[in-house]
Amino acid sequence: MASMLLYLLTISFFFLSPSLADASPSDPVSPGTICDSTPYPSYCKSVLPNRTTNVYGYGRFSIRKSLSQSRKFLDLVNEYLHKYRSSLSISAIRALEDCCYLASLNMDFLSSSFKTVNGTSETLPPVEAEDVQTLLSAILTNQQTCLDGIQSTASARGIRENITVPMSNDTKLYSVSLALFTKGWVPKEKKSASRHPSSKQIGFKHRRLLMKLSSQTLSTIFESLGQRKLLQTSGSDNEVLISNIVTVSQDGGGNFTTINDAISAAPNNTNGVNGYFLIYIPAGVYQEYVSIPKNKKYLMMIGDGINQTIITGNRSVVDGWTTFNSATFAVVASNFVAVNITFQNTAGAIKHQAVALRSGADLSAFYSCSFEGYQDTLYTHSMRQFYRECDIYGTVDFIFGNAAVVLQNCNIYPRQPMSGQFNAITAQGRTDPNQNTGTSIHNCNIMAADDLASSNTSFKTYLGRPWKEYSRTVYMQSFMDNLIDPAGWREWDGDFALSTLYYAEYDNNGLGSNTSNRVTWPGYHVINATDAINFTVSSFLLGDDWLPDTGVPYNATLI
């Protein structure tokens, strides 16, 4: 009887005790209990201090330790490069240099994240929570990019022993930090930001910018732009604020002869209060590799139109570059905007991975641009990005990466691949269930490029395949022509990620949109409007809070 009473009391206690999910983040909880809610419970328990505190205390400890480890990792890679550079292949050196660059970014992101979490022990407002979750998500992406580069090099054995082992533990630590932040500081329901403008912005009218200029800028605008009617002034409230304008002209008639020189002249670490530093790039072919570093924030580049202003290069993995640094154009500075420009990588299908544009720029927007390549054309690497009325051409995995990205009203053109290949439009790279990343393709057109449409050979084309374990891609209200294979999606390697990915389709049309013969993977879904709205500009990017400043038009929600 006594044992039965004890049993009943135990059962009653089990049902009456609040679960960790129901408990307040400020309630004390043991390290073991909190670690069970992370992707790496055992590692988490080995790292967190053996004392009871709340989610906020554990989260601050984990992020602080992550910052310390990121410094150690950067020192380790620099030391390895200094010691062994002469014996390493050029591809290995480039991979390690990528790691140094990415580790430096991680230190910045962790420092910023710790500053935020150290200042509060309560749920953050949606926009602020999204900012930090984006940074912590990008840290994991940067870590994975470093690892991918190392694993693809010919001299990887020694590097694996010295570099990838500590990387593995650091990755687990970063994942724990993201999980704890998500549990403590992120609101349970993701809401739109505080600003609620109309869904269509009119900063650009007929692809011309309605701008607001300072008096100092007005005095130099005609000198900078000559007789070109690129820009218009307006009395509208929807103007885009411009702090300064420079022109690139290869014949010496502008302020600079190269795009990179114009970027160098932009102010460092501006906060955007005075507007964008605008670089006008007239029609022409610009054969240069452009890299916009993290300190060149609030840059806007405007060309003369698709196939008029062309930035081109031909780096590829076959020629010894990493995928990451094969990009013709790369940007990591936040609040970047590009309009009316074509970005090319002309290496060709035979050179495999060859990136036209890589963006790790937070709150970046691309409007009326074209991205042309074959394999790995558009590398939406990390952070939050928006593409509107753009053209994207490619073959294998040609929209890939791990940003939180929405492509809206774009034209997606699969090209003719090499013999024996198939086309996969997307290869999304989410590696952690707490990352706020994924690819949302909204109101786009998916049609064969001319070479594929006229080919006498039949090639299969798929909506995507899972590059990483938690790959997430959604197609909504888009036109899919008959080139899309009835299965819709393609495996990466056997059953890898088929249960953990999230692939979804909603309200698409066209001969390729029929879902009756789609894959039957656990992670594939045909969703309704309630689910689809989570992947709109307003919900997925909190775009109402930042896109109006860019002047780029957008639809905030479903159409």
Image (tube, rainbow, N blue to C red):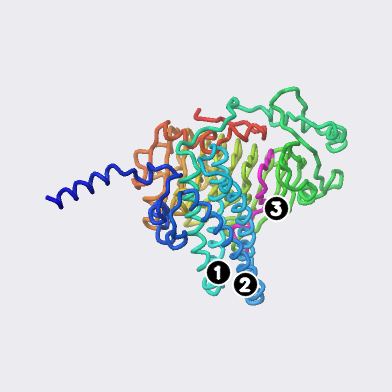
Query: Is residue 65 placed above or below 379 in the rendered structure?
Result: below
Look at the numbered discs 2 and 3 and tell me whether their residues touch, using CB distance below 8 Å: no
Q: Which residue in the protein does label 2 denote?
A: 80
With 500 as the anchor, is 246 left or right in this view?
A: right
Furthest residue toward bottom:
87
With 226 as the anchor, is 120 left or right in this view?
A: left
Q: Which residue in the protein does label 1 denote?
A: 163
Query: Does any portion of residue 1 appear in the rendered image?
Result: yes
**Which amino acid does the dot numbered 2 rest on?**
Tyr
Furthest residue toward top:
235
Furthest residue toward front:
2
Mark 2, residues whose alpha carbon is within 10 Å: few (<14), some, or many (≥20)?
Answer: some
| Numbered mark located on residue 291 in the image | 3
Residue 540: horizontal and vertical position, in percent?
Answer: 52, 38
Residue occupying image coordinates x 62% and y 31%: 553
**Which amino acid does the dot numbered 3 rest on?**
Ser
Residue occupying image coordinates x 83% and y 36%: 225
Query: Is residue 183 placed above or below 99 in the rendered structure?
Result: above
Q: Tell me where residue 243 sits by quadrant.
A: top right
With 498 as the anchor, is 370 left or right in this view?
A: right
Which residue range is magenta in the image? Answer: 320-340
Mark 1, residues whose alpha carbon is within 10 Å: few (<14), some, or many (≥20)?
Answer: some
Q: Earlier in the sequence, mark 3 or mark 1?
A: 1
